Amino acid sequence: AHAPVSSRADTGRLIGAALPSLVLLVGEQADGKRSLGSGVIVSRDGRVLTCLHLVRGMHPLRAMRYSPALVSYTPMDGGLDRFLFENRDKLIDVRLERIDEANDLALIRLEADTSDVAPLPLADELPQRGDAVLAMGHPRETVWSFTSGVVSALHHGAIQHDAAINPGNSGGPLLN
């Protein structure tokens, strides 16, 4: 047996600190289908880092900031469709500012005040093999959630891990 990597209380504090910087991205593709993803607020002036594949060709592209007062639903209760319908007035316009094709990154800006959000601190060094990580986002339309895993390898700065990245949490932060 081995000691736990972190306590439940530590994990809860980490999630609580990260949620205010997490955004839900909702876009419409050219064929009319809805696309979902995640992003993380990286500055107090509304800049959000996400994956380029989530925002390319989306029009309109909108975002929603986290609020603990928002009620989410299981698929049996109406799921994400109900959540978005009931909270449509909380969707914020977004504009694309910069892209990095090679790394699948996009910097977007929320058309809203985010001065109350402290950007997440960046790690001083890469995680090591065996470190626990959390992938924050909206996996499988479960808003404001996360998946957990372990780092298995590092490849020229890319972190290989087994925290599930499902439709909806791509673009969100990986926390350690």
Image (tube, grey):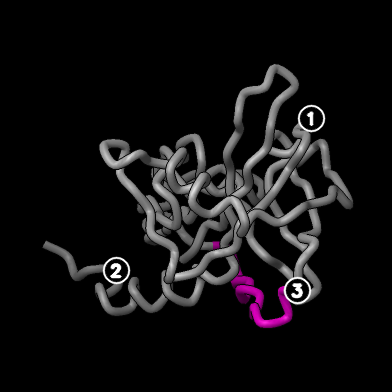
Which sits earlier in the primary sequence, circle 2 or circle 1? 2
Residue that label 1 marks: 57
Q: Quadrant of the N terminus?
A: bottom left
Query: What kind of residue is marked 3?
Result: Asp
Q: Nearer the viewer, mark 1 or mark 3?
A: 3
Residue in front for this viewpoint, 122 or 19? 19
Per the image, label 2 sits on a secondary structure element best described as: loop
Characterize the local packing of mark 3: few (<14), some (14-19) or many (20 or more) Cα atoms within 10 angstroms.
few
Query: What kind of residue is marked 2?
Result: Val
Q: Is residue 42 above or below residue 121?
A: above
Asked which quadrant contains residue 72, the reply is: bottom left
Residue in front for this viewpoint, 48 or 80? 80
Residue that label 3 marks: 113
Q: CA distance from mark 2 to mark 3?
A: 36 Å
Which residue appears farthest toward the left when viewing the image? 1
Per the image, label 1 sits on a secondary structure element best described as: loop
Characterize the local packing of mark 1: few (<14), some (14-19) or many (20 or more) Cα atoms within 10 angstroms.
few
Q: Give the residue drawn at x 88%, y 52%.
A: 97
Residue that label 2 marks: 5
Per the image, label 3 sits on a secondary structure element best described as: loop
Q: Give the residue drawn at x 80%, y 62%.
A: 111
Residue in front for this viewpoint, 163 or 52? 52
Q: Measuring from the top left, give residue 148's x and y in whole percent.
A: 36, 53
Left or right: 98, with 129 as reference point: right
